[in-house]
Image (cartoon, helix red, strand yellow):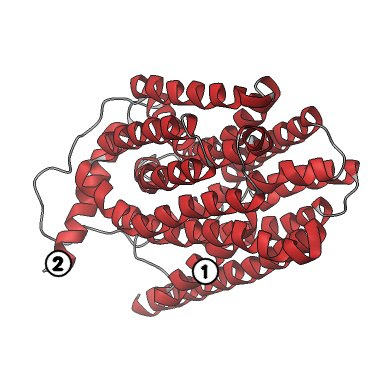
Amino acid sequence: MREGVVRGEAVEVSSSAARWSRHGPRGVASVVVGMVAASIAPFLVGTMSVQIGATFDFTARDIALGVACYYLTSAVISPFGGRLVGRLGTELALRLACAGCTLGLVVAATAVSASGVVLALALLGLPNSLVQPASNQVLASVTSVRRQGLSFGLVQSAIPVATLLSGVLLGIFGQGASWRTAFWLVAALTVVGQFVITKGPTAAGPSRRGKPEQGPDDAPVGGRTFMVALVAGGLLASLAAATLPAFVAVTGQGSGLGPAAVATAQVVGSLACIVARVSFTWRGAVLGGPRLLSGVTCLLLFGAGGYLLLGTGTAWVFGLGAVLAYACGWGWNGIFNLSLTRARPGRIAASTGLAQAGIFGGGVLGPLAFVAVGRNGGYTSAWSFMALVAVAAAVLVGFAGHRWSRDKACSERREMNGR
């Protein structure tokens, strides 16, 4: 009985999301606003860490703890967040997320110690758990294949837009206590974002208890093993990527770069990530599901090379590594989420919640692992370890793609035998 209710809810939210998606660019803009608002805080803290440390004691350990708390909250709440989006509707979920981000950023802006910043990041993990399930639910209803891929790429580019904005704010407010002004400004932008979110359904509506009609391509693929491999791969890929916004700035300064040069590297890397997410997802939208995951695998392997370059200690090599790591080591999210919606079309929000739990779990472990490895071996050892983690993630995602291909081949054989 419970399964019927869940499936019925999936149909209701899909139809609601489909109605909302008719707003076109405004609907995509709504999701982008929610993504930027929910994701910018840990990047802003990492980028402004030196300036925060000039106001009160704020070390690399505090950065790691704060970012870990942010992702831990997101990871724990995400499975429930996916179901909550199904009950609230996409518009209300995004509005609640933006309001929560405003509150968390105000707490960060008024912090008088490292514990205040850590608390703010922990609170900001709550709205973050709602945004991705709402995003995938809306974008999955876009019927044009190319347009769907472009929409996923644009929405996923919101996260590197957040890092780009952090880099710009570092360049503007990079002197002493003025870091608080940057946080107040971003908090104000999240309030303005409420006016961008387009009007949509506020709830799923009356329950239709029954199994939705499914086409031949709508059945879940790969079974439980597929989801386990995909979630584990997302966890490891995120573990490596989460260290970029948190530790690129301090690594660059350790390589002899000044604040302006570090900000430039972060902005250029973020732009490269935006271009990668949009272009790869847009071009990859016409591919079959297994080939989408092959694209994720390739990006992770190239990203591993970028992580290695970041730890060389040479300024120009660091800049090259930042671009490669941001573009490839962090450019896989759009294709990853697009493949997830095609693998689990009947339960997009719930499946996204599970996948995001893995991704946010990686966000918890990444900064902690970086500090643990770097304590003895320095930045070179820490970034080398992240490269190995990215390779392991590529192996797991490749295995998930193999399971998908095998399942697809079996389905085609059954269809042929049934004729």
Look at label 1 and name its amino acid.
Answer: Ala
Q: Position of residue 171 (x, y in %)?
A: 70, 24
Say which mark, if any, is on residue 232.
Answer: 1
How crowded pointer 2 is (Cα within 10 Å; few <14, some 14-19, many 20+) is rated as: few
Look at label 2 and name its amino acid.
Answer: Arg
State left or right for residue 271 relative to residue 357: right
* Badge count: 2
Q: Position of residue 223 (x, y in %)?
A: 40, 74
Q: Position of residue 73 (x, y in %)?
A: 40, 54
**In the figure, residue 382 lies in which quadrant?**
bottom right
Residue visible at 34% across and 77% down?
418
Residue 335 or residue 89, whichever sits in front: 89
For the residue labelled by badge 1, is the local secondary structure a helix, a strand or a loop? helix
Front label number (1 vs 2): 1
Q: Is residue 286 visible?
A: no
Q: Is residue 2 visible?
A: yes
How crowded pointer 1 is (Cα within 10 Å; few <14, some 14-19, many 20+) is rated as: many
316 versus 288 height, above or below: above
126 versus 188 height, above or below: below
Say which mark, if any, is on residue 240.
Answer: none
378 versus 175 height, above or below: below
Residue 242 or residue 124, whichever sits in front: 124
State left or right for residue 229 relative to residue 16: right
338 versus 179 height, above or below: below
Give the Cα distance between marks 1 and 2.
Answer: 27 Å
For the residue labelled by badge 2, is the local secondary structure a helix, a strand or a loop? helix
Residue 13 or residue 98, whichever sits in front: 98
State left or right for residue 33 relative to residue 296: left
Q: What residue would you read off at disc 2?
A: 2
The mark that comes first in sequence, 1 or 2, is: 2
The answer to whether mark 1 and mark 2 are in CB contact below 8 A is no
The quarter of the image holding the N terminus is: bottom left
